[in-house]
């Protein structure tokens, strides 16, 4: 009981600390700053059509890794004119020509304000929506993928049933569509709420602030304006797809890998009964892949901050779904230290 109490106190203290730092960063955002955008390159051979993607990138060395190029090629093949926005402050000259060949625009900016500032910059530079814009996809390189064709994901989008779509939805902090894959239809793009949200966005140097005020805030702003939001892989369907048969045996399994699956399934089921929200891209990673989601979070495989105990199974699950994980393995070979993928 004492250990639990100490954990709660530590969590509340950390949350309060992040809030304070966030408010300080917000106040600093009003101070004069130099220009954020360092260069803009436009490819006249790729005009802006009805489908536009704003793709946010970051690599401290300005590299565009093979898994990112694979994502850009998939978007290009699906008819998207891409506005590539990098927060790296530079672009490696070895990769720049390949990126430019796939994109309508390449925008290089300093990394101030994280992804949402880059998103806002992309929307501004591309002057979206334009008269012929039907949908705008906002995506970033926080995921590996697509691990399967994107056709199914885009076929699921129906703007007659929801105005804003995303791959996943979260109830953590407050209901929101997770921002790594957002698709806005014409009704959203023409709304006052959309314009006000991006017009009021500040260059805040606090990731906690960006998540709580901007990622969560975008969905809440649109909902308050009477617009509807939906996930391609809904939270409820994911938790309901957990294999409850794994919990039929109460004793720990002698196979640690299978036991990890049981522990994870148990945590998910208990979260349902206690009404505790999970992060679908972490705790529900298996269910997402099995349901057809073409992405897996890089952070999950690199650091696993949520301490998901069955993530060592990721290769078996992805290959069982017929996915090619070569690019993921190559990137993990470069990144991981003292850990097996």
Image (cartoon, rainbow, N blue to C red):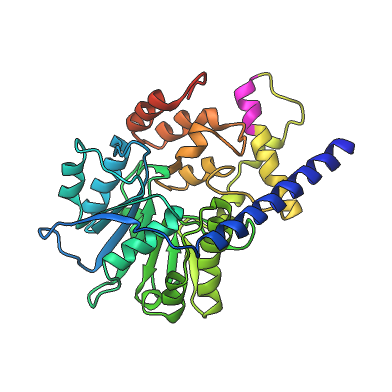
Query: What percent of the width, then of the height, locates residue 254?
Result: 68, 18
Q: Which residue sits at x=27%, y=63%? A: 52
Name the quadrant containing residue 92: top left
Image-based side of 255 in relation to 325, left or right: right
| Horizontal and vertical percent position of residue 77 | 21, 51
Residue 184 in view here: yes
> Residue 176: in sight, yes or no?
no
Relative to 218, is 257 above or below?
above
* Nearer to the camera, 20 or 262: 20
Q: Main secondary structure of the magenta part?
A: helix
Q: Quadrant of the N terminus?
A: top right
Numbered marks: total: 0
Residue 144 vs 336, above or below: the answer is below
Q: Could you say which is closer to the camera, residue 188 or residue 271?
A: 188
Q: Which residues are magenta?
A: 255-261
Report the residue at 66% width, 56% height from top. 19
Left or right: 77, with 304 as reference point: left
As drawn, 118 above or below 319: below
Q: Position of residue 93 (x, y in %)?
A: 20, 38
Write down the quadrant of residue 181 in the picture: bottom left
User: Residue 250, image x and y in percent?
Assistant: 77, 31
Left of 296 or right of it: where is 221? Answer: right
Asked if residue 94 lies in the magenta stretch, the reply is no
């Amino acid at each position: 009981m004492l250990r639990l109490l100490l954990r709660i106190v530590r969590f509340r203290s950390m949350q309060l600390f992040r809030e304070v730092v966030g408010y300080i960063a917000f106040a600093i955002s009003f101070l004069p700053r130099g220009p954020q955008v360092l260069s803009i390159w436009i490819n006249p051979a790729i005009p802006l059509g009805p489908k536009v993607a704003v793709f946010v990138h970051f690599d401290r060395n300005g590299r565009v890794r093979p898994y990112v190029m694979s994502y850009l090629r998939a978007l290009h093949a699906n008819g998207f004119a891409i506005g590539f926005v990098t927060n790296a402050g530079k672009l490696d000259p070895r990769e720049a020509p390949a990126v430019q060949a796939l994109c309508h625009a390449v925008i290089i900016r300093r990394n101030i304000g994280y992804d949402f500032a880059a998103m806002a910059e992309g929307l501004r530079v591309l002057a979206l929506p334009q008269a012929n814009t039907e949908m705008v996809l906002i995506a970033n390189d926080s995921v590996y993928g697509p691990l399967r064709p994107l056709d199914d994901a885009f076929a699921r989008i129906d703007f007659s049933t929801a105005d804003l779509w995303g791959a996943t939805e979260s109830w953590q902090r407050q209901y929101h569509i997770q921002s790594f894959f957002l698709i806005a239809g014409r009704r959203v793009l023409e709304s006052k709420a959309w314009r006000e949200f991006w017009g009021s966005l500040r260059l805040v140097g606090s990731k906690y602030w960006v998540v709580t005020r901007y990622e969560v805030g975008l969905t809440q702003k649109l909902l308050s304006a009477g617009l509807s939001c939906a996930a391609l892989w809904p939270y409820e369907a994911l938790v309901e797809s957990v294999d409850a048969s794994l919990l039929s045996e109460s004793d720990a399994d002698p196979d640690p890998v299978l036991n990890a699956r049981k522990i994870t399934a148990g945590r998910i089921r208990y979260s349902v009964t206690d009404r505790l929200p999970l992060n679908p891209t972490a705790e529900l990673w298996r269910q997402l892949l099995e349901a057809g989601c073409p992405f897996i979070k890089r952070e999950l495989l690199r650091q696993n901050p949520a301490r998901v105990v069955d993530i060592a199974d990721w290769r078996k699950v992805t290959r069982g779904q017929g996915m090619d994980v070569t690019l993921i393995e190559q990137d993990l070979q470069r990144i991981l230290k003292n850990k097996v993928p």
